[in-house]
Image (cartoon, rainbow, N blue to C red):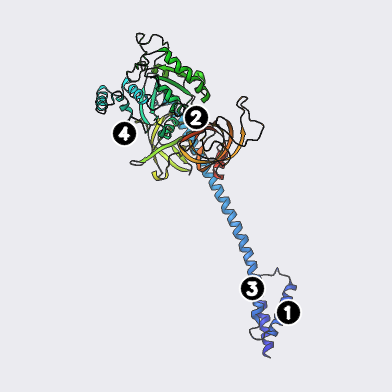
Amino acid sequence: GGGGEEEERGEEQQRAREDDDGSEHRQQAQTAAASTVAQKVAKTLTIGGDSGSDSALSQMAEREQKLKEEQQRKEDKEEAKRLLQAEKERKDLERRKEAEKEEKLLMEELANSKDVDNREHLNLVFIGHVDAGKSTIGGQILYLSGQVDQRVIEKYEREAKDKNRDSWYMAYIMDTSEEERAKGKTVEVGKAHFATEKKRYTVLDAPGHKNYVPNMIAGAAQADVGVLVIAARKGEFETGFEKGGQTREHAQLAKTLGVTKLVVVVNKMDDPSVKWDKKRFDEVYTKLIPFLKVCGYKEKDITFVPISGLKGTNVRDLVPKSECDWYTGKSFFDTLDDLEPMDRDPNAPFRMPVMDKYAEMGCMVMGKTESGACRVGQKVTLMPGRIDCKIEKLWQDEDDVSICKCGENVRMKLSGVDEKDIHPGMVLCPPNKLAFVTQEIECQLAIVELLEHKSIFSTGYNAVIHIHSVTEEIEVKKLVSEMDPKTRKPKESKCKFLKAGSIGVVRMTIAAPICVEKFSDVPQLGRFTLRDEGKTIAIGKVLRIKPKSEEIDNMSKTAGAAV
């Protein structure tokens, strides 16, 4: 009767297990069916008879359990996500409120600060052919505005004589590195400051030599006014202006980089081959004007001034009639002073592209405040990467300041960030109004000239973009349309390629995420040049931005800026 006992035991266990499972919700019918199955199984496998029924049931129970757990996990996950979102929104709101409070403080401080020099500040970039005399004029300016004293000049004069470079001594003031002096060429963008009663100026002396054009871009990217230096000496103007000369490329570059006002300084008027001859001055004028118009300068934004950089004639003080009786304009300084003020909105969100960084008792960054203002103690965010940091100290042209307006060259000490994490081209902005980060832009592009072996600009073209302080590789993704040069409207036909001289709307992708703004919002962060194999092939401005990620997208929505 062993079999019978085992059957009973099997049934008991079955019942106990069912009670245990607490699964009363299973229909009775199922239970009955299961127990008959169990009995049959037990009969056929008298030994270890209940393991079969066991596994069938435990599998069902396990499945149930798994489903329940899965469901629970899902709910937990969603709850956590909700909490995270809420926390993020709360933090964002906090950041925004704090940033708005900071903004108010900043505006008040700007209005009341004794620290703010209300003379307009302009960055001048001297551009032109290699030996047109840019550095010499720069040196002369510093001397005439009392930034360099006579002794220093005499020292430089001696140095230049030792190297048989008599007329270069003025340039020595601007060209500070040995390499530059030995070559007599300016490599890095030299910087110098001077002021008149009306305005303050920083002179960026940009190199003119062909190999140094990227340096010239760095200089012009910070510039507000371009000073195009033309050498009037016989033959020199011509070489600077012919196909390979720099004068053309520089004037074009300057325009793209946002230098809207141009003072054309006709230098070396004292040269024996010129002797302040009006004919030569007019010849330079008539040859340059059409070209500058093609570059996009309006005639009202161009002023021609004849000078002698070496002797300082007509630089600060008007040229005496005894030396030049036909000139009725102003001296170079007066011309600059009377340029109409730059259009700068003090209430725009703060933007400062990082030009350079170094570690010195903390993390130091340098750049030009392209829009808005900033003050010591302000919390700012570095984009891309959204690194929050704080401005600990501010210097404006070497002076310690507590607040700084738009258009200034600034050094600042940041806390909360490691110098290793900062790269030139990153942009400092307020936490509630972040700069856009993107890897794809749509832009209006004017093709300047293409390389001989790549004479067609079409989808898949690769080049290097220079935008504010960023240099990155790009690829053309799509040619949207070509502009009809006469009507300035897009042509009807589909655009397959662009040639030198044509203008089009182009979509391109960038190798790494960078900060840009639409040209219409912040022109300084929305214009660029494209270079290929060391040649400027196109100039452009950003029309539309495809935001990089959800986070940035959210930020722009909450900041109330529609992209």
Say which element carries label 4: loop
Q: Nearer the viewer, residue 147 or 139?
A: 139
Q: Is residue 287 above or below residue 497?
A: above
Which of the two labelled residues, at mark 1 and mark 4, occupies the earlier sequence position? 1
- Name the spot of residue 381 as percent of width and height, x first: 46, 40
Q: Residues within 10 Å of mark 1 (few under 14, many from 20)?
A: few
- Name the spot of residue 99 as percent of width and height, x first: 48, 37
Image position of 529 (left or right of 396): right
- Examine the rendering and report whether any part of residue 30 can be seen: yes
The answer for how far apart the CA atoms under marks 1 and 3 are is 17 Å
**Which-is-in-front pick, marks 1 and 2?**
2
Q: Which residue is mark 3?
A: 58
Image position of 363 (left or right of 484): left
Tell me which amino acid carries mark 1: Thr
Tell me which amino acid carries mark 4: Ser
**Which-is-in-front pick, marks 4 and 3?**
4
Q: Which quadrant of the rendered structure holds the N terminus?
A: bottom right
- Name the spot of residue 453 as percent of width and height, x first: 52, 38
Q: Looking at the image, which residue is at 31% across and 31% down?
A: 181
Quarter residue 560 falls in: top right
Q: Is residue 483 above or below residue 340?
A: below
Residue 36 numbered tag? 1
Which of the two labelled residues, at mark 4 and mark 3, occupies the earlier sequence position? 3
Q: Are marks 4 and 3 in contact (CB under 8 Å)?
A: no
Q: Residues within 10 Å of mark 4 (few under 14, many from 20)?
A: some
Residue 177 numbered tag? 4
- Examine the rendering and report whether any part of residue 434 can be seen: no
- Name the spot of residue 305 as percent of width and height, x first: 42, 17
**Which-is-in-front pick, marks 1 and 4?**
4
Q: Which quadrant of the rendered structure holds the C terminus?
A: top right
Residue 256 numbered tag? 2
Q: Nearer the viewer, residue 252 or 86?
A: 252
